Amino acid sequence: MNLRHMRRSALVVPAILILGIAGCGSNDADLPASVPTPGLSPQSASTGADLPDEDADPTENVPTSPEIEETPLQPAPTPPEDNSSPSPDPGSSFSGTLGPVSKQSGSGTFLSVTDIRVGEHDGYTRIVVDLAGQGNQPGYDIRYVDAAYAGGSGDPIAVSGDAILAFNVTGWGYPFDTGVDPYSGPKTIGGPGSGSVAEIEVGTFNEGVAQMFVGVRGGQREFTAMTLTNPPRVVLDISD
């Protein structure tokens, strides 16, 4: 019995050794793929970091970029408003009125007439009354009249032309109020050789008014008026 048992044991041991040697020499392709431990994520062999799950949604758990708030476009700055009084646009039709027109002078304004100028432009003739003294807000009263008369005395004044435009500048003052010498220029100022103004007749300067009369060629024509400052001036444009 013992001898038989020993023979059987001797046969079993070599068989086990042969099986073990055969298993060590098998190809890697025949081995099953590694199965990850349940509950743990597969890891990279090189870094040990968790590998992504192939069945997972690729967009899941992907950090989103913070939303960038769009800044609304700011409107272009508006250019500052030009409060100056432009001249009529050369080449365009003159737009004016047959009057009458008036503007009240400012309080505390006492101005002397220092010069009266006239010149022809493209489409209109301009008359400028230069002033100086106290205050900076002259006024005016401009209207067509049938005849010209001197203020105060009522004496008639002859004016050349086909129509007479009375041009009164208000805010005028005596030299002791203005501190400026009074106007000493000619009483008759001829207009340009062509254009609407035939001549200017200077009337009286009295009671806050500097009186002038404009002889207009071709009958009544439209006109515009404005005041300017630094130095103070009154401007009269008459359509040609």
Image: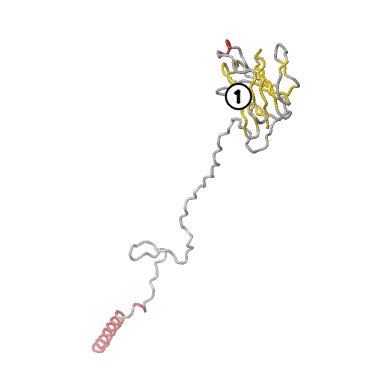
Residue of label 1: 117
Specify few, some or many for label 1: CA neighbours under 10 Å numbering under 14, 14-19, or 20 or more.
some
Q: Position of residue 74 (x, y in %)?
A: 54, 42
Foreground: 94 or 199? 199
Question: Picture quarter containing residue 98?
Answer: top right
Instruction: Judge whether 89 appears above or below 51 on screen.
Output: above
Q: Where is residue 173 in the image (x, y as percent from the top left)?
A: 61, 14
Q: Quadrant of the N terminus?
A: bottom left
Type of amino acid at the residue the image marks with label 1: Arg
Residue drawn at x 39%, y 67% is: 37
Q: Position of residue 21 (x, y in %)?
A: 28, 81
- Label 1: element kind: strand
Q: In which quarter of the image is the C terminus?
A: top right
Residue drawn at x 26%, y 85% is: 14
Foreground: 158 or 122? 158
As drawn, which residue projects farthest toward the top?
Answer: 176
